[in-house]
Amino acid sequence: MDIRHFKTFKSIIEEGNFSNAATKLGYTQSTVTSQIQQLEQELSIKLFEKIGRNMILTPLGKELIPYANELLNTVKKIESVGKYGEKITGELKIAVAESLMSYKLQNVLSLFKEKAPNVKLSIISLNCYAIKNILLDGEIDLGLMYDVGIPNDNLTTVKLSDFNLALICSPLLEQENLDFSKSNQKINTSLIINEVESIYRKIVESYFFDNNIFLNNTIELWSIEAIKKCVGSNLGISFLPRFTVEEELENGKLKELNVGCSDAKVTAIYAYHKNKWISPAMSLFIELVRKNFNIS
């Protein structure tokens, strides 16, 4: 049984199709197809089936994913024996909530690049629920996100910090009669906020719903910087982690509004699968994150 076939299988899962996997691995598409066929013959199971123009994982193919991940993690451990010393190599895949990526990890990334220049670092920015799912599927090594309140025994999670939230608006907004701590009102403005699965969006929308507070509409953006610029241009209000707007609040480009859920907090954590091998690169990254958040 050839380990390369399992690497090819995992690449197809990660890249979404045979063609992209071939490009990533430097193979022809026919080589990828041949390797999967050989793996299917050796295992006596069908891993993919053709539906229309697409190759779709079979139920048995889905069952193989965690075993393939475990096997390839073991291979990484074996390959690392005696290779590191003071020089850390390899690959590290992390996923980060956008606000943490943009405002809390720049120093970590700079130090990691300095201390481990030979590590291939892959970073994606996703919402916290998506990060949790791909951690469980073994698609990434480490996730930095907010606690979404749904514990899972297959994940190891470590608290980093609690963060306050703030309801913000433009200084141009007429604020005299605005009081979001009062129930049963219709307010002539828009909520400018992240995607539906954003944890702080869930908090403020739940508060508005429970207190019968209605706004004109919701403008959904995926960039906090874009949200802040729209709010600053008086296109609406937003509810964001305070650390993302502290500079604008201090220099008067944004103002804070009273709201009944102002005591709500989000908890930043890092997490990894309990079966994940903590490579030297991953260990260093975690160490830098902990120092950055003053975790002993």
Image (cartoon, helix red, strand yellow):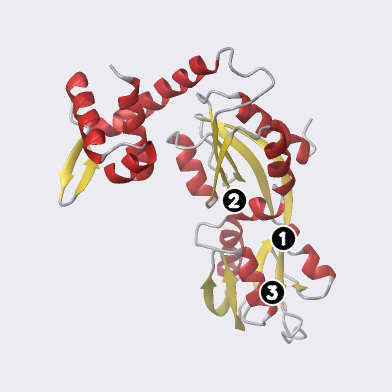
Q: Position of residue 230 (x, y in %)?
A: 63, 76
Q: Position of residue 206 (x, y in %)?
A: 57, 63
Please report the residue visible at 75 percent of the width from the left and 71 percent of the height from the top. 258
Q: Which residue is mark 2?
A: 97
Badge 2 amino acid: Ala
Secondary structure of the residue carrying numbered label 1: helix
Q: Which residue is mark 3?
A: 180
Contact (CB < 8 A) between labels 1 and 3? no
On the rendered image, what quadrant is the N terminus found in? top left
* Vertical position of residue 265 compared to residue 21: above or below: below
First in sequence: mark 1 or mark 2?
2
Q: Quadrant of residue 49?
A: top left
Badge 1 amino acid: Thr
Q: Which residue is mark 1?
A: 244
For residue 15, side relative to residue 113 (left or right): left
Please report the residue visible at 27 percent of the width from the left and 42 percent of the height from the top. 18
Contact (CB < 8 A) between labels 1 and 2? no
Q: Position of residue 61 (x, y in %)?
A: 26, 32
Q: Nearer the viewer, residue 210 or 20?
A: 20
Q: Quadrant of residue 115?
A: top right
Nearest to viewer (mark 2 / mark 3): 2
Instruction: Give the CA separation, mark 1 to mark 2.
Output: 13 Å
Nearest to viewer (mark 1 / mark 3): 1
